[in-house]
Every structure is written in structure tokens, then in C-alpha cells.
Image (spheres, helix red, strand yellow):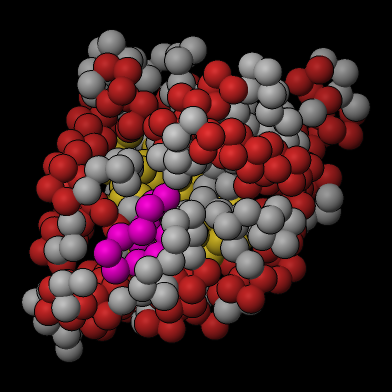
């Protein structure tokens, strides 16, 4: 963007000023940030060694840049790789949750735990960043509804049904289909999440899983970090026939900034990288191994840049197909290595908002995008849960009983 080059046109300066003012009035709610995993890998959650209270060069996220970016609420992903399964996945997820709670406690003057939309608003009134938790992948519950309920007790407010690998009860977008979307236990997971008031996150899942979850759900769903398939042909994005169901469901697609999901050229680069990785025995869906491979491979095969304009195009496509009430933002910072030019870290959100204002998005539309839609979905999910809890007991059904242990 021109302001980064030091030669901004007067009109752009005005849009950037208006963007910052808008974000002060409507602090952004972002759907996905992987800082907790980075904290685990870099320092084992030692927030003295990784002091996010000051500027950092080792991460895309810290508290000063979140403030500069106008972020008022952040869903922290308590992600663990789907190469972990069973008890190992559950244990690592609990460690991630503990790490986020410790982070919130360490910076209690600037962060506040939030479990409801009202608690997000309360954090904003005290000048603190509302910190929410989202679990990225059904492997984190180990095929146990009891574990799902305990994650909710610990503050987790969404569960992504899969990560890069299938679970025994749900098909991933990047694995070979096994159950045809959701198994009977998978549908029971969705029903129990609705009863708890935990949002069903359909990022990472196969299209068949999206449709099965939408058929099963009593409450709005979310895509915490996905973009539009029509603009970038990758299985991690959301096709138009699914986006078109969001008005009747009430859910929201939180457009992500990951270049491989935004730019067709970068998506093609990833396909080439995956083929090269397969030749040396590395699976692209193995998040850690593939990341190590591409870090070396791209020295001779540079990754194409994505742009703010491409992110804007995805936002506008979701708005066109699903409607202004059903679009949000899920940056996925610290979840990948590069981001679009001008959006390299969490301080970049005002530049995106300025680009939208320059394209004649109204203040009301932008306020819905950055905050209103996600809080509305949270409130709707909470209301459905209150109703269901009056009529439905916690489910005692098991994967082995519903799916036959196969």
C-alpha cells in the first residue's frame, strides 16, 4: 500500500485515518491467531522469555501491534498438529489452553478472558483485549464428548471439526474421504456443541462435512479462517453453494489472509511444493514437516506475494454470495510464514479497512465485518444453548456405540 512506501496520496491518508477511527469505535474481533503454538515452540510458554508486552521480531503478533491494528478481541487457537492423536492430542491441547490462561494472567492489565459476547463487550469497556479460545481440530477431543464438555468448561468457544487430517468421525478437506462428511458420532458432536454453546467451526473440513454439519446444526456455524473457493481454487476455501446457505443458518465466514488461500498464484505454488515434498516422502498435510520442507524449497522456488486487493476481493465475494451479515475476518497470524503485502503482521488491519472504505464500503458495513457479525453469531449460539439445555441432557453417546468402532 502507498502509505508503506512513504508516498501515500492524500485520499489514501484520509481513508487510513478514517479506518483507524472506525476501529477505535468498533475494535476488530479476529477469528484465528496461532501465537499460542509459537509460544510453545519458542519458549515453552515462558512469557518472560517471549515478552509479548513489547515489540517482537520473532512473531507476527504482540500486544503493541494488536493495539496498533485496532484489534479488540482475539480468538487464540489452542491448536495442536493432527499428527498427534488420542491421549497425546488431548494432553497437548490442555497444555495449549493452560498456556493461553497463563498468557492472559501475565498481561492481566491488557488482556481479559472472554467466554461470551457480553464478556467481549465488558473487556472493551475496560480497555483490554478480549481473549477467547478456539480448538483447531476434532482430534483435540479424542472421540470423547466428556472431553468436549471439559474444553468448554476451560473456556474453549469453538471447535474446528478437523485439521489437515480426518478424525474418525469427520472428513478433512485435505485428506482422503472416509466417512462421507460426518459419521453418526460426528453429528452427535455437532449437536452437543450446540447444546453447550460452542461454535461449530467448518474451516479445514471437506465440503461434504460442511453440508452435513449445516444439516445437523441448530445454531449458526463459523468458518474461523477460510476464504472463497470461487476466487482461489483450494480445498481449504468455501464454495459458493455453502456460502449461499449461511443466511438461512445465520453463520459467518471469516476471511483469512493466508496467501495460499487468497492468491491463485500462491495456491499453485503450494501445489507444486506439495508434489516436490511427496517425492521425498513428506506429506503436505503434515503441517510441521511440510513447513520445514517449504522453508528450504522456496529458496529456489520463491513464493508469489498476495495483495490486500486480493483479500478485499474475497471479502466482497463473500458479501455478494452470503450477504453483509455473514462475513468476518480471521487473519491466521503466526499460523503461516508469509502474509499479503501490507498485512504482514497484526498491525495491518487498518490498511485493509482503508482499502474497503476506498471501495465505498459504508461505516455500518465495515463495523459489521470487523465486529458486529461475529458478536451476533456468538449471541445466537449462546441463545440456542440456553434453549437446548432446558430440554436436552448432556449426551452420553460414544463413538464406538454410534459408529461401531470402525
Quarter occupied by the N terminus: top right
In the rendered view, tell whether residue 248 sits above or below residue 379: below
- Between residue 324 and residue 284, name the one nearer to us: 284
Residue sitting at 33 percent across and 53 percent down?
137
Task: Write down the quadrant of residue 146 in the picture.
Answer: bottom left
- Between residue 67 and residue 389, name the one nearer to us: 389
Total numbered badges shown on the rendered structure = 0
| Magenta part, dominant SS | loop
Q: Position of residue 63 (x, y in %)?
A: 43, 25
Residue 16 forms part of the magenta stretch: no
Q: Position of residue 315 (x, y in %)?
A: 69, 55
Give the residues in magenta.
159-172
Q: Position of residue 198 (x, y in %)?
A: 30, 64
- Residue 85 in view: yes
Residue sitting at 68 percent across and 56 percent down?
233
Residue sitting at 50 percent across and 26 percent down?
293
- Between residue 332 and residue 56, name the one nearer to us: 332
Amino acid at each position: 500500500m502507498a502509505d508503506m512506501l512513504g508516498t501515500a496520496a492524500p485520499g489514501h491518508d484520509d481513508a487510513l485515518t478514517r479506518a483507524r477511527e472506525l476501529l477505535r469505535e468498533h475494535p476488530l474481533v479476529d477469528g484465528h491467531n496461532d501465537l499460542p503454538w509459537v509460544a510453545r515452540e519458542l519458549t515453552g510458554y515462558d512469557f518472560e522469555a517471549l515478552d509479548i508486552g513489547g515489540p517482537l521480531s520473532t512473531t507476527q503478533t504482540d500486544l503493541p501491534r494488536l493495539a496498533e491494528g485496532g484489534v479488540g478481541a482475539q480468538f487464540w487457537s489452542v491448536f495442536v498438529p493432527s499428527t498427534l492423536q488420542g491421549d497425546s492430542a488431548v494432553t497437548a491441547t490442555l497444555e495449549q489452553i493452560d498456556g493461553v490462561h497463563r498468557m492472559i494472567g501475565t498481561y492481566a492489565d491488557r488482556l481479559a478472558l472472554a467466554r461470551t459476547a457480553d464478556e467481549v463487550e465488558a473487556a472493551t469497556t475496560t480497555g483490554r483485549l478480549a481473549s477467547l479460545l478456539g480448538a483447531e481440530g476434532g482430534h483435540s477431543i479424542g472421540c470423547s464428548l466428556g472431553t468436549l464438555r471439559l474444553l468448554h468448561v476451560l473456556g474453549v468457544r469453538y471447535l474446528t471439526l478437523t485439521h489437515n487430517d480426518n478424525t474418525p468421525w469427520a472428513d478433512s478437506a485435505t485428506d482422503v474421504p472416509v466417512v462421507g462428511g460426518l459419521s453418526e458420532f460426528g453429528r452427535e458432536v455437532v449437536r452437543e456443541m450446540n447444546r453447550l454453546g460452542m461454535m461449530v467451526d467448518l474451516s479445514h473440513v471437506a465440503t461434504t462435512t460442511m453440508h452435513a454439519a449445516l444439516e445437523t446444526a441448530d445454531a449458526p456455524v463459523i468458518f474461523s479462517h477460510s476464504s472463497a473457493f470461487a476466487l482461489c481454487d483450494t480445498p481449504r476455501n468455501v464454495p459458493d453453494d455453502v456460502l449461499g446457505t449461511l443466511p438461512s443458518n445465520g453463520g459467518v465466514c471469516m476471511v483469512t489472509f493466508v496467501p495460499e488461500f487468497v492468491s491463485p498464484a500462491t495456491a499453485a505454488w503450494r501445489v507444486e511444493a506439495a508434489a516436490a515434498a511427496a517425492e521425498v516422502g513428506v506429506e503436505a498435510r503434515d503441517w510441521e514437516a511440510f513447513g520445514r520442507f517449504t522453508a528450504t524449497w522456496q529458496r529456489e522456488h520463491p513464493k508469489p506475494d498476495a495483495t490486500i486487493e486480493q483479500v478485499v476481493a474475497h471479502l466482497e465475494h463473500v458479501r455478494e454470495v452470503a450477504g453483509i451479515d455473514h462475513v468476518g475476518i480471521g487473519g491466521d497470524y503466526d499460523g503461516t510464514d508469509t502474509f499479503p503485502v501490507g498485512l504482514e503482521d497484526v498491525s495491518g488491519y487498518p490498511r485493509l479497512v482503508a482499502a474497503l472504505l476506498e471501495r465505498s464500503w459504508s461505516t455500518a458495513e465495515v463495523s459489521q465485518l470487523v465486529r458486529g457479525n461475529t458478536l451476533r453469531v456468538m449471541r445466537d449460539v449462546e441463545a440456542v444453548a440456553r434453549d437446548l439445555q432446558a430440554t436436552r441432557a448432556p449426551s452420553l453417546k460414544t463413538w464406538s456405540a454410534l459408529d461401531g468402532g470402525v
